[in-house]
Each structure stands twice: as C-alpha cells, then as structure tokens.
Amino acid sequence: MTSIEQIAASLEGYDPQAMSSTQVTAFLQRLVQPVQERETVALHDALGRVLAADVVSPVSVPPHDNSAMDGYAFDGGALRPGQSLRLRVVGTALAGAAWRGSVQSGECVRIMTGAVMPEGLDTVVPQEFTQADGEHIHIAPDLLRAGDNRRLAGEDLMQGAGALAAGERITPAAIGLLASLGMAQVQVLRRLRVAYFSTGDEILSLGEPPREGAVYDSNRYTLFGLLTRLGVEAIDLGVVRDDPALLRDAFARAAAQADAVITSGGVSVGEADHTRSMMRELGDVAFWRIAMRPGRPMAVGRIPRDKIWVKNGSSAYAESASSSFIRSNIFPNEALLFGLPGNPVAVMVTFLAFVRPALLRMMGCTQATPPLLRARSSEAIRKKAGRTEYQRGLVGVGADGQLEVRVTGNQGSGVLSSMVRANGLIVLPHASGNVAAGEMVDVMVFDGVI
C-alpha cells in the first residue's frame, strides 16, 4: 500500500511545513475511497443518503397529456390570426376521471388542472381568459397559440430514461421525484460512521466545575452538529486526557467502530501532550502546517485495523494475532484519521474546507466540492499573500440588488461568536493580497451545511 507520505510527496511542490489548501484538497482526492456496501431503505428514510445505483424511470411522468390550467380544452388548429373563436362546451374533464366523449369542430371541453386531455384536443385556454355565452365561450383573437397550457406525456420523464444517477445525494426534490415514479424504496450506500473526541488536560466536559486554565469543550458539540447535518452516524467518544494509555485506547475504540476518526487538539508542534506520538504509533500519519488562516496545524492519516482488536464490545490495541481479542471485520482495513487544531473556529474551518468534502467522497457522493458564490465586498479586507484565508462573512443584498458581503467582526480562531453571526466564509485565495471595498470575492455559504 502506498504510504501517506508517498501520496503527499507526489503533489507538485510538496512541503509539509507550507501546504496550500489546494494541495490538501488534491491529496484527499487521491486518498479517499468511497464505501461500497449497499442497502435498501424506505423513501421516508432516504433523505440525505447517497444513491448506490442509477434510477431508471419505470413509467412516463406524466403518463398522459394533461391540462396545466383550469379552463377549456380545444383543437388549436381552429385558431386564426386576428380572429376570435366561439366554441360550444360539450362536457367536463376532471383530474383523475378522463372524459370519454367525442369532440367535433367548433366544440370544447371544460377541463381541470391535471385532467387528461380528451382525444384530438391539444390546447387549453385559461378560464379567466374567456367570456361565457350560455353553453358557448368566446376567446379573444391572438391570445393563444396551438399547444398552449398542455403538459405532454413524459414531459418530466419518459419511461426508460435516467431519473437520478448513482452518487447523487437524495434531496427533498429527489424524494418527490422517486415518489412520482411509484418507488417506495431506493438502494443507497451504507451510512458512514465517524467517531470523534477532544484531547487535552485543559478541556472540561459540560457539567464539570470551572477551574483555572481550563476551558469547556465546544469542539465536540460543533463536530456533532456538522456531522449530523452531513448525515453520517456520529460517535462521540468524549474528552481524552493527555495520557498515552487513554489515548491509545481512544484511537483503538474509534478505529474499531468507525470509517473515519476526527480529533481536535494535540497536532501542533511542541505541544505538551502525547497525541502526535500516539497517532504515529498507531497509524500512517502526515503532520502538516497549512498555509491558511485560521487552522494552520493539521494531521491526516490512516489507522490500520490489523492492530485493532475487539472484545465484548470494547476495543484495545494489540501487537499480534496471538492476542485474546477478536479483530473487528465490520469495516474496511483502515480508518481514515483527521487531526484538527484545537481552536474552535479553526476546527470548523478545516472541517468545512477539507474534512466535509472528504467525508462526502467516502459516502460515495459525486458532488463533494462546496459551491462558491461571488459577492461584492462592502469593505476593505486585510489579507496577507501566501496563504488562503477563510474570513467569517455575512452575505446580503445591496441597495442595487447585487450580492454583497462584509466580515463579522473579530476573526480570531477562538472567537465562535463571529462564526455564529456569519452565514458564510469569505474565501481569499493563496496568492491574493488585500481586498478593496467593492471588489468581488468568493463566499462558501453555510446554508444546509451548518
């Protein structure tokens, strides 16, 4: 197997002390493999899941030509330029109850929205555009063209046509489309499992009393929200102290039951903890300093499961197959590892920029790259060339109707309040410098993500 360092070294200009955001993205694209296992779920349980196979339409939608309006159906061939049209109403077609009569020249059928078009009729005049005269209606000249207000059979989908493609995430619209095809179930890739924990002696769990030098753990709750919104099964392993035995067990338990492991804290050079050494001991890991702000330190790697063994639902680290533990075969041969910084905003930014797209690829999703909007900066923004910056921004509509964005105050990597006030990240590229007021910038919007 190609090592993490070998994969990273294949990147053009690779320098682990000055990785660019583009290089990290390219590395993860080479590293990540999608899950393969499939399952069939009911449509009500399919939202956010990833399609395992193409969906071919078993029927035409709609199955018949039908009316797009409440009005009167007639033969559009009777229309003449500059001439009004007088038609006799000979029946009524209701939605769900096709009208079976015959229509002669000069006649029409009153029709409801969604009703099947009577044979020989191809045009519908909306009711409000007609004048009634006993059993006749009058249509003003040059109001319609032949074929207006008719929905064609198969206009949405023809029988045998591709409806959805493998790798698409199932949205509310996709659920509606599947239902319109009469499908009560759909085949999806299995749900990804992601374990996460925080590291450090200075981290307090909720409920613990405050103490000097300690902070309450916000990262696990942020990660829970991000992972839940993503649609994976999130496994919270709590706070792990800077103790080699505890860290070894935490990594083992995480890798034994999850496809990916996310930690926060303990990846900076010189930190007084054992997280870095434990990552190296258990897995194939690269430690980087990324040219970005916030979120400079990051670790990415793999934990091979040939050293992870399970006994009675708990896990431990074992050196050989002679161990009394039984190896877990639930997942592939390795768990992907993401070691994120400890500062709260840095955790969110590195997750959104790198981890989320990687997890989407693991889920089998073909659309993993977050889209960027272009918006006008309403103010000057200071930016240092040589690093990618992700500044918290608030996007709105300016007085001229164009999208504009402003930063949300203090951009410190520990200031979560400015992230709460933001609805997107202003993405300032690696080579760019200061941004002038009125200049266009890229924005990664939060809607549907956090």
Image (cartoon, grey):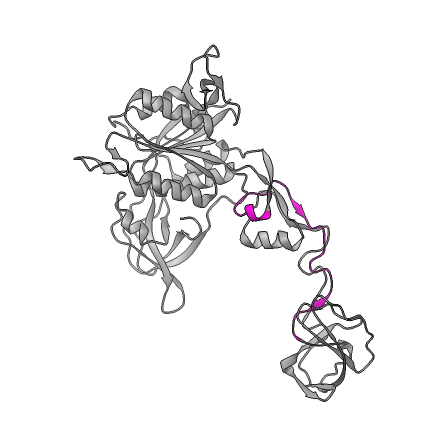
Q: Is residue 438 visible?
A: yes
Considering the whole magenta stretch, tell me its main secondary structure.
loop
Which residue corresponds to the image point at 50% horizontal and 22% vertical from the top-left?
A: 328
Which residue occupies the extreme bottom position in the image?
133
Q: Position of residue 354 (x, y in %)?
A: 42, 39
**Residue 364 in which image quadrant:** top right
Q: Is residue 171 left or right of residue 132?
A: left
Question: Depth check: 40 or 404 in front?
Answer: 40
Q: Is residue 83 left or right of residue 293?
A: right
Q: Position of residue 151 (x, y in %)?
A: 69, 66
Does the magenta-highlighted stretch encompass residue 335?
no
**Residue 431 in which image quadrant:** top left
Magenta segment, which residues? 43-70
Q: Is residue 46 visible?
A: no
Number of callouts in the render? 0
Does the magenta-highlighted stretch encompass residue 62?
yes
Which residue corresponds to the image point at 73% horizontal and 67% vertical from the top-left?
A: 97
Which residue occupies the extreme top position in the image?
322
Q: Position of residue 199 (x, y in %)?
A: 30, 30
**Residue 210 in which image quadrant:** top left
Say if 216 sits above or below 249 in the image.
below
Q: Position of residue 374 (x, y in %)?
A: 42, 56
Say if 447 sits above or below 282 in the image.
below
